[in-house]
Amino acid sequence: MNSQKNRFIRLLQSQRFGVVAFTFLTAVTAVVLCLPGGTHGTPILPVHPPTPLPSVDRVVVSGSIGQPKVVQGSEGVVALQLSVQTPAGGSSESDARPTDFVVVLDRSGSMGAANKLPFAKEAIVALLERLRPVDRFGLITFDHFASAAIPFGEVTPASREAYATLVRSLQPGGATNISHGLEVARSMLASAASDRLQKVILLSDGEATAGDTSREGLLALTRSMVNTDISTSTIGLGLGFNETLLAELADHGQGAYGYLEHLGGLSDLLVRTLEQTRSVYAAKSTVTLQLGEGVRLVDAAGYPTEQVDGNAISLATGSLLSSGLKTMILTLAVPTAELGEQALGSVTVRYVRDGAEQQTTLDDALKVAVVSEAHRSEAVASMDSGVVKRTWLANNFGRMQKELQQWVREGNEASARQVLEKYLSDAEAAAPAGSAVGDELRVELAPQVAEMESKLEQAFSGNAARQREQQNRVAKELLSESRGNLGKATY
């Protein structure tokens, strides 16, 4: 831990920092680290406060390069920020598109603990109250096997009361067959195929223990649902579930992921999910990169990728919300052996709207100039402050959090601290001290790094039982925050 703190101090001691700034930031770090529980549960703030978006009448994609000039012989790593903006949908709830909404509820034995099933049942009853006559609903429950507790169809005033009674009568059962629950949901919606928005939301508190329990099989299942325009979101209940798997199911299902340790807010979360589904502009989207010669995709911000052909790579980027802005930062590596301009490639966004596939392309040419060592200062000066800071304060920070989550989940303190150390080292190299963007980055990094130190202290302090509980909790916090920083759909 001391090596990380020492590096953090060195990061802040650039030649343009005075004693006052250094003392202030060091004090902030110390205070945060010494608070009981650190900053447990506090979300990382965005780099800049959100500003109102100008309205558009079509889907628009834009791109910015973090460093348009790189030095010959360097690794040639550059950040490409892509933003996809969508026009407004309906202006009121009555304008919102009809929705097919299926809840897949875990009622395994563990759901009987900590009142998880009672909270889930009341949340579903609250959801029934928010359904419109044009919406259709179904409820699937699973333990060893899955079955339809509420048949798929419209919810009338008469049936709503009967369904509420049925939901409240549900009891916990045995194992956790997630795959069968999703398969029944897929069949339910396939039998009623339409141009409606179709959403499946999985609620589970545990690991898959029956049916197809393999990661590959479960991810393939949600991908197959996307192929029929069904998106899948997941919500983990409590602390006993596998957050990595549920998040991946949401990613491959082009949906959102979230979790609640305490389930008092589940009703609000389910209703919010329904309202968000109604505001979807496009059911699914992909970003396809046709990379220039010699250009490599180093990191896709955690989005599932597929090699389409040759140098074309497709990213599954999920639903697009009306009047929304989806921003992602991709990391590319360009060849730097030869001086001159290097084309990064082209970008195409494809999406499904009203059952039809549409597309839009990035009009701006994406190019990077390779300059000689003698012009290194030009390369540094070419940095786009906004993109570079977003890359390190959000995207790369989120990637680092995802790695931390994996090591914390496994209880490996040494590897977790090495991940944080490497992130700090890479940030120091990418934004040199003395440059305007480098100095700004160091100031804004201070509280975020302090929070990560605090989380590691939480995860690896106390007796073995206490550490195991805290590691489980911190791992889930890290994954959720990571997704937010990467710009992925997160509740």
Image (cartoon, rainbow, N blue to C red):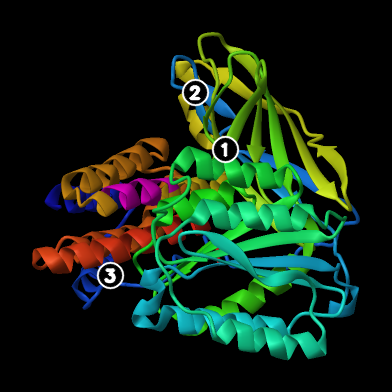
Which residue lies under the disc numbered 1? 330
Q: Is residue 176 left or right of residue 371?
A: left
User: Within 10 Å of the Cα at label 1, are there few (<14), some (14-19), or many (20+) other Cα atoms?
Assistant: many
Which residue lies under the disc numbered 3? 28
Which residue lies under the disc numbered 2? 76
> From which residue to which does the magenta span run?
399-407
State which tag comes first along the sequence, 1 or 2: 2
Query: What's the CA distance linking mark 1 and mark 2?
Result: 14 Å
State which tag comes first along the sequence, 3 or 1: 3
Q: Residue at x 24, y 48 (%)?
A: 416
* SS state under label 1: strand
Q: What percent of the width, then of the height, locates residue 404?
A: 31, 50
Q: What percent of the width, then of the height, locates residue 377?
A: 48, 29
User: Within 10 Å of the Cα at label 2, are there few (<14), some (14-19), or many (20+) other Cα atoms?
Assistant: some
Q: Residue at x 23, y 59 (%)?
A: 456
Kind of residue sitting beneath label 2: Gly
Based on the displayed image, in which of its 4 quarters is residue 93 positioned? bottom right
What label sits on residue 65 in the rendered view? none
Q: What percent of the width, then of the height, locates residue 130?
A: 73, 83
